[in-house]
Image (cartoon, rainbow, N blue to C red):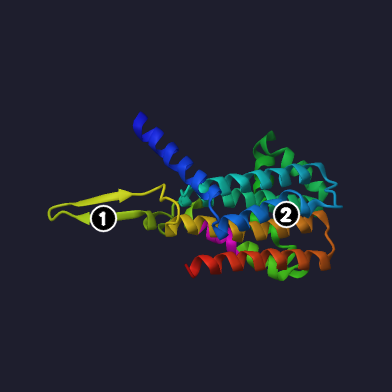
Amino acid sequence: ERAAFEGYIDAGDAAVREYLASDDELVQALRAFDRYIQHDLKEGLVLKATFSWILWMSATQLYLAAVRTALSSHSAAVFPLIRAALESAAFSYMISQKPELEDVWTTRHDGPEALKKHRKTFTFSEAVKGLKQAQPQLYDMAQQIYDGSIDFGAHPNPKGIMPHVSAADHGDAYELTYTSVHGIGAPEASRGLCMCLDAGLAIAGLGAMALGMEADRMQVDLQRLNDLKNAAVDAYMNE
């Protein structure tokens, strides 16, 4: 058990070090996304609702955790973190638009009725529905990425599990292998990095909306990030 524990940690850490030392286009794009989300996005803007700010901080740190996990090449574990990061970003946006919902969020654990009200109010689809008219492209993208995070690992669904399973036929029995840490450059490892880029774009958009960024600036910023993402993915696909 100790060997398995240490082997998993060591393999993931080795992949992280190798990716960070490389000139991998996906990794370089993720560095740029992080700079934008952590710094450039907030330039000249302030989240006025306290818990909107707290949820945004949660979103950014969960996103970093997803990137860290993707760099370890354990792609299946990326998707639960992406889902949680998207929910935090969406709830930050929701409270920025309706500060009175802070009370619903903070009183979740005050009893059965408070829990019921919280669960009904704070769902991803409810949180982003205001984007349908204000930013329909962002709405579609965020919903698609959120649904994808559930399909590919945030829930134990076939798409999230079976790509990591292999079988060897030994005649009278099959040997099943489940691979978690795939190693740098493996297709599944790259899938995790690509998902972080997709999710980063949605999280950046939700943050821009929560902060009340001007529409023209938001369009320019998100287009730049999208172009960067597409260039990185194209470089990976053409290898």
Left or right for 1, reference 235 = left
Which residue occupies 73% across, 47% down? 56
- Mark 1: few/some/many CA within 10 Å (<14, 14-19, 20+): few
For the N terminus, the image quarter is top left
- Residue 25 screen position, x and y as percent: 57, 60
Most frequent secondary structure within the magenta stretch: helix
State how far apart marks 2 and 1 are (Cα).
42 Å
- Residue 119 screen position, x and y as percent: 64, 47
User: Is 147 part of what is drawn in magenta?
Assistant: yes
Q: Which mark is residue 167?
A: 1
Query: Residue 149's image quarter?
Result: bottom right
- Mark 2: few/some/many CA within 10 Å (<14, 14-19, 20+): some
Which residue occupies 72% across, 60% down? 205
Which residue occupies 51% across, 45% down? 16
Query: Residue 202's image quarter?
Result: bottom right
Query: Residue 27's image quarter?
Result: bottom right
Q: Which mark is residue 92?
A: none
The residue type indicated by label 2 comes to Tyr
Label 1: which secondary element: strand
User: Is 222 part of what is drawn in magenta?
Assistant: no
Left or right for 98, reference 31 = right
Label 2: which secondary element: helix
The residue type indicated by label 1 comes to Ala
Q: Which residue is mark 2?
A: 36
| Number of numbered tags placed on the structure image | 2
- Residue 98 screen position, x and y as percent: 81, 52
Q: Is residue 162 above or below residue 224?
A: above
**Which mark sits nearer the N-terminus, 2 or 1?**
2
Q: Which residues are magenta?
A: 144-151
